[in-house]
Image: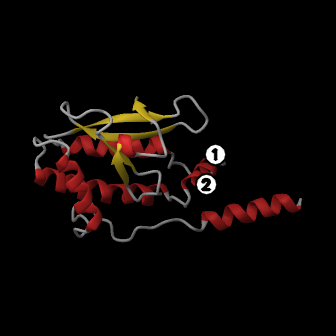
Amino acid sequence: MKQFYLFLFIIFIFNACAINYESIDIEKKEPINKNIIELSSEVSKLSAKIDKNEAMTFSNDVISYSKILANEYGVTTPPLFHNTLINLNLKEKGYCYHYANDLMGHLQEKKFKSFYFQRIVANRGEYFEHSSLILTRDDISFEDSIVLDAWRNAGILFWSKVKDDKKYNWEKK
């Protein structure tokens, strides 16, 4: 019985640690910061055919929207613990595929012209299968495409080239 109460206590403690990114307004965007500039630069370097203004708009938008999704899902950190809360029916959304689906839908609505997005998966069919997105173009190899993972850091967007992501071995979905 003590174990049951301890389990409940842990659930409620971690459930109370929800992340709340304050004042995120997708229309106003975040103030231009180091992360937005770095992501925009990485996107722009992928191909001479990528519009630099579009890369900056995208970077601001995707970083902001990742936080908005975490707020909407009532995410607790770390993400694997949040997944446990979903499994216990204490939370409704916040799995990696929720982030990937919602982020994909949002980004497709923006109709960026100099790049597009594809779904990717790591550990397909395994217990710890993981879904995310890449930013790419037809003149960019899969390995040089940029991973966009909003789940990994609980709403703080992770990005890197596919080949540089040491945590996951990605493949197209």
Q: Amino acid at mark 1?
A: Asn
How far apart are the alpha carbons under marks 2 and 1? 10 Å
- Reading the image, the residue beneath label 2 is 81
Total label count? Answer: 2
| 124 shown above or below 6 | above
Residue 109, x across and y down, in percent: 23, 42
Looking at the rendered image, the disc whose residue lies closer to the viewer, 2 or 1, is: 2
| 147 shown above or below 63 | above
User: Quadrant of the rendered structure where residue 67 is?
Assistant: bottom left
Q: Quadrant of the C terminus?
A: top left
Question: Which residue lies most toward the right here?
Answer: 1
Task: Using the rendered image of the protein, determine whether residue 69 is visible from the camera's viewpoint.
Answer: yes
| 52 shown above or below 126 | below
Numbered tag placed on residue 87 in the rendering: 1
Residue 141, x across and y down, in percent: 26, 32
What is the secondary structure assignment of the residue under circle 1? helix
Residue at left offset 79%, top offset 63%: 6
Numbered tag placed on residue 101 in the rendering: none
Residue 23, x across and y down, in percent: 33, 70
| 94 shown above or below 25 | above
Q: Nearer the viewer, residue 147 or 21?
A: 147
Q: Amino acid at mark 2?
A: Phe
166 left or right, relative to 12: left
57 left or right, relative to 95: left
